[in-house]
Image: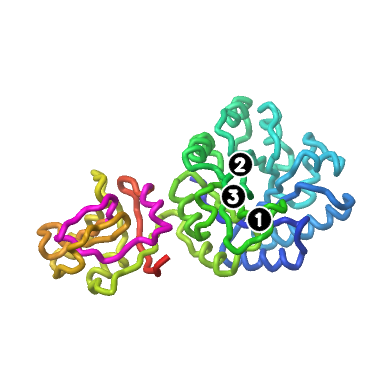
Amino acid sequence: MNPRRIGISLYPDHSDFAANQDYLQRAAKAGFSRIFMSMLEVSEGKDQVTHKYQALIGEAKQLGFEVILDVAPNIFEALGISYDDLSYFALLGADGIRLDQGFDGKKEAMLTYNPQHLAIELNMSNDVAYLDNILSYQANVPFLYGCHNFYPQEGTGLPYDFFASATSRFKRQGVRTAAFITSQSGTLGPWSVNDGLPTLEAHRHLPLVVQAKHLFATGLIDDVIIGNAYASQEELTALGQLDRYQTHFQLTMLPSASAVEREIVLANQHFRRGDITDRMICSTEVRKQYADRANPAHDNTGEFQRGDVVVGNDDFGKYKNELQVVLTPHRDPRKNKVGAIAPAELMLLDFIKPWTKFQFEEGHEA
């Protein structure tokens, strides 16, 4: 399994070195380890371009980042370099290049054998047999990456089903995958239009951490990259602290929740039992652990809604102190409502499959 990573994006042609240096240092401290770096235009001489990118990439490498350069075809002509010789990008210090255009499959496969051992990153945002064609030419898979596009215009991001289908083509072949999320404070991207830079349209106005939780929960994405710059310190810190391998739901607890209910919910590792139901997600182990703890009825007469977290009360027999997450509205006075998952995170419930592990963190109303 590819270890999961978080990353940032830099736009050297639209920013200054000091601001980028500060951003790199703050991101590294927060646990980020990957950079998407734009190189889509040449507005200076080759010597100036070389110096600018060498300095910034050198700073990033000292901080432990992997750097992938996003290169447009016009860059090669402007700098007098060729796809047949990628040594210039190694000279800059990059770990790989993202191809902005596709070839015939044979070409991409050959590029993965470049003597500089640069990773070759492919565009994942087309649900076609592009990767299969490249692999049929015996590409060097450890040096082959996949990364989705980002979409700066409101309404142009990918719908989830298309995203999942396109990404699965790469995931099932063992290729490292990446996608973009968007900071709600970042204003910098490669173009003048910048309504955020997510891959998925559904993410455009969501909190940054929720976007990342969603991408990791799909099980399809290895690297989550903030598409725009510069994310706030609060966003960097929160994303750096995120569990990349297990969903932690943000939960607003009711004031009436008892001490034992709070312990059941917040202090335990939960998993969905294997024989599932459509009505709720059941975490059954806690009822065995807390079988002897009293749990009087409260907040048990209304209709439970999707995302409500309930715990069986003293009237529920063997199911007393079982934790459930409501999927479809229903009533049952044998259950106490103890909290509710943040509305922005309800989308994550679709990824809690049989035996999926999950936890809760107490938050505030979204």
**Magenta stretch containing residue 263, yes or no?**
no
Q: Which residue is mark 1?
A: 9
The CA distance from mark 3 to mark 1 is: 19 Å
Q: Amino acid at mark 2?
A: Tyr
Say the numbered circle drawn on residue 154. Answer: 3
Q: Which residue is drawn at the image coordinates 59% and 49% (left, top)?
A: 154
Secondary structure found at label 3: loop
Residue 19: give x, y in percent of width and height. 72, 67
Residue 272 as seen in the image, left or right of residue 207: left
**Mark 1 or 2, which is nearer the eye?**
1
Is the residue marked by circle 2 packed among few (<14), some (14-19), or many (20+) residues within 10 Å?
many
Residue 54: give x, y in percent of width and height. 79, 56
* Number of numbered discs on residues: 3
Is the residue marked by circle 3 packed among few (<14), some (14-19), or many (20+) residues within 10 Å?
some
**Magenta stretch containing residue 344, yes or no?**
yes
Residue 140: give x, y in percent of width and height. 63, 34
Residue 321 appears in the figure? no
Using the rendered view, name the quadrant where residue 323 is placed: bottom left
Pick whichever, 186 or 117, lies toward us.
186
Secondary structure found at label 2: strand
Using the rendered view, name the quadrant where residue 301 is placed: bottom left
Q: Counting residues from the N terminus, which is met first, the one under dot 1 or under dot 2?
A: 1
Work out whether 84 lies above or below 15. above
Q: Which residue is mark 2?
A: 145
Q: Which residue is drawn at the image coordinates 21% and 67% (left, top)?
A: 299
Secondary structure found at label 1: strand
Magenta-tinted stretch: 325-350
Q: Amino acid at mark 3?
A: Glu
